[in-house]
Image: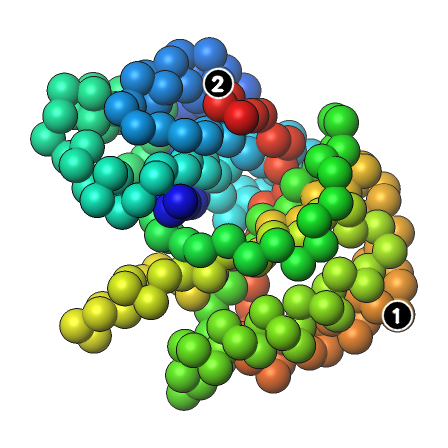
Amino acid sequence: MIKSIVFFNRRADLTVEAFQDYWLNRHADVVCRLPGLRRYVQSHTLLGGYRKGQPAFDGAAEVWFDSLPAMQALVGTPAHDALIEDEHQFIDRDSMRTLLVDEHPIKDGPLPEGGVKNLEIVKAKPGMPIPAFQRYWREVHGPLGAEIPSVLRYIQNHTRLGGYAGGRVPPADGAAITWFESVDAMREGARSTAYERTRADEANFTAGHLPVIITHEHTIIA
């Protein structure tokens, strides 16, 4: 299967609450009409994430299809046109960043009921070849992150190599997704030596600052 992750912000005239309500209770139905859609998850940035200003994004949508051709075949269909039209009702489309990714489970634990989900956008260290970046992230850095005590589940999402074809530059080289029992549990993990080792290792393969959003997950199609 192929997975798409789309990060985006709300329209400027909408409150966070109105944006989240429309996305969950109106737009989800439009997405679910896409032929061939296998799985669909919304991740809404926690309201607490706005206390210090605007987060990196208001949320992220993840959708799964059987293959890239199956996804590409949607373009120009009535269902896809309706999706684009409805996005204008609540999304700042200029803010949208789309990654086509391959999933790599690092810690395949259970999803916590009512837990929190951390999405971190990853860019490769300048000059580091993408295959080397992906290998280091998966084989060296991944096991370090899996040792953080409060991490219940950890999935690396690597931007597909096809996204670099012809000299193209995707908006990011991947996204790290981790799940925690609660915000407090996540903070507790950040005080561990395993967390310190994980953060220190980021300089070996990433470009530095990693934009992050802390979210609540809504599984629309499992």
Q: Quadrant of the N terminus?
A: top left
* Mark 1 to mark 2 CA distance (whole Å): 38 Å
| Tag shown at residue 201 | none
Residue type at the position of mark 1: Thr
Q: Nearer the viewer, residue 17 or 110?
A: 110
Q: Nearer the viewer, residue 62 or 106?
A: 106
Q: How many marks?
A: 2
Residue 84 quadrant = top left
Q: Which residue is mark 1?
A: 193
Percent of width and height locating residue 102: 44, 55
Residue 9 appearing in the image? no
> Of all residues shown, which one is farthest toward the left?
76
Q: Nearer the viewer, residue 132 or 16?
A: 132
Residue at horizontal 50 percent and vertical 37 percent from the top: 59
Residue type at the position of mark 2: Leu
Residue 110 quadrant = top right
Report crowding for label 2: few under 14, some 14 to 19, many 20 or more residues within 10 A (C-alpha): some
> Of all residues shown, which one is farthest toward the bottom?
127
- Which of pointers 1 and 2 lies earlier in the amino acid sequence? 2
Residue at horizontal 33 percent and vertical 67 percent from the top: 161
Percent of width and height locating residue 75: 15, 35
Secondary structure of the residue carrying numbered label 2? helix
Q: Which residue is mark 2?
A: 24
Residue 44 appearing in the image? yes
Position of residue 7 in the picture relative to residue 186 (left or right): left
Residue at horizontal 61 percent and vertical 31 percent from the top: 217
Percent of width and height locating residue 70: 24, 38
Position of residue 210 in the picture relative to residue 166 (left or right): right
Residue at horizontal 34 percent and vertical 22 percent from the top: 31
Report crowding for label 1: few under 14, some 14 to 19, many 20 or more residues within 10 A (C-alpha): few
Residue 129 quadrant = bottom left
